[in-house]
Image: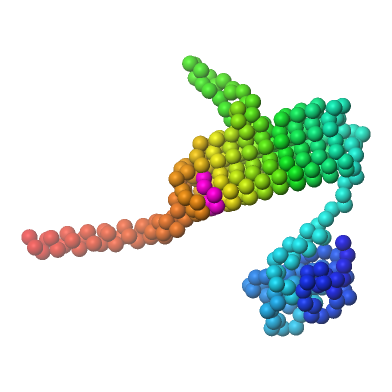
Amino acid sequence: MTINVAQLCELLQGELVGDGETEIHGPSQIDKGVPGTVTFLANPKYEDFAYTTEASALIVSRDFTPRNPLKASMIKVDDVYGAMMSLVEKFGDVIPREAGISKNADVANDFVLADQVSVGAHSVIEPGVTIGKHSVIYPQVFIGRGTKIGEHVTLYPGVRIYPGTIIGDRCIVHSNAVIGCDGFGYRPDEKGHYKKIRHAGKVVLENDVEIGANTVIDRGTLAVTTVGEGSKIDNLVQIAHNVVIGKHTVIAAQAGIAGSASIGNHARIGGQVGIAGHIHLADQIEIQAQSGVHSGKHPKGSKLFGYPAIRYNDYLKSYALFRQLPDYKKRIEELEKQISALKGDTQ
């Protein structure tokens, strides 16, 4: 997309200060701006870059008054972040993939394909699969038998969808994610040898879910592993069998959720968080990175931190004390000496 500054300002319903004729062909960071790009200033600590950036347009808040002359034209808006994210989406639009099935794809005769679906080269689609309209299946994707895929879904290269999976509308699954594999389920026999437990359940991704690259979601043993509507899962996340994740929950990279755990709606799970199996976490819970959660006895909206995780503010207070333990030890030893000396004086 190419657009001039004045048109950009009109698109954002902003106020233009400066030249409106310069053409803009993309966004840039404020410290790495180049001519022909638009950047933004939302955090005051980056203001110095506003006077040195080579970007042609600068999005600022309506109350911003520059201390020094600007090279860039200003576009003043109510919501700087919102305006910039809107532009990133517009400039980030990729050329649509051509609808149709690549001659190099391996597809079953009975799979159901809606209008305007693209299937890339070397993808494999097994019998009984249905794919909704305007969905894009990139090259080298595997879709197992009986899988149902909604409309406007995107499966990036290398995605593996095991049989019986259900994927709702507008879902995005990034490269090398695996959806619907067996969970880590075994039982020891009388000799202590582990026997595999068959997994007959499935995975359901509700509408508007996004799954990051290399994330793995296991199918249920007998039940359904579910990721709720609007939830976003980062890269390298492990979601075990029978897990239920609520609506509009976000989970950052390298988190692991053990089997049969459930997480409420609008939760926020930080990177490398570990959640034990068979516990329920309430709605709107927030867990800081690298925390370990072993109990579900936390009310709605709780903020947790640490290992094992406790209330966020309690952890910070405890950690502040922990850092001072060497000083406390020294002071206690000095007090013991003083007490011993006093005892000596009274004897």
Residue that appears at 60% across and 27% down: 222
Residue drawn 81% across and 72% down?
A: 9
Figure quadrant of residue 133: top right
Per the picture, the main secondary structure of the magenta-coloured stretch is loop
Q: Position of residue 124 (x, y in %)?
A: 82, 31
Q: Is 127 rendered above or below residue 48?
A: above
Query: Is residue 316 rendered to the left or right of residue 60?
Result: left
Would you say residue 282 sits in the magenta stretch? yes
Q: What is the x, y in percent for residue 78?
A: 70, 72
On screen, residue 346 versus residue 17, left or right, reads left
**Is the residue 32 above or below the residue 156 in the image?**
below
Q: How many marks on residues?
A: 0
Left or right of residue 341: residue 89: right
Name the one closer to the observer, 265 or 240: 265
Quarter of the image where the N terminus is located: bottom right
- Range covered by the magenta-colored residues: 281-286
- Residue at image point 17% right, 59% down: 340
Q: Nearer the viewer, residue 330 or 111?
A: 111
Q: Residue at x 68, y 79 (%)?
A: 63
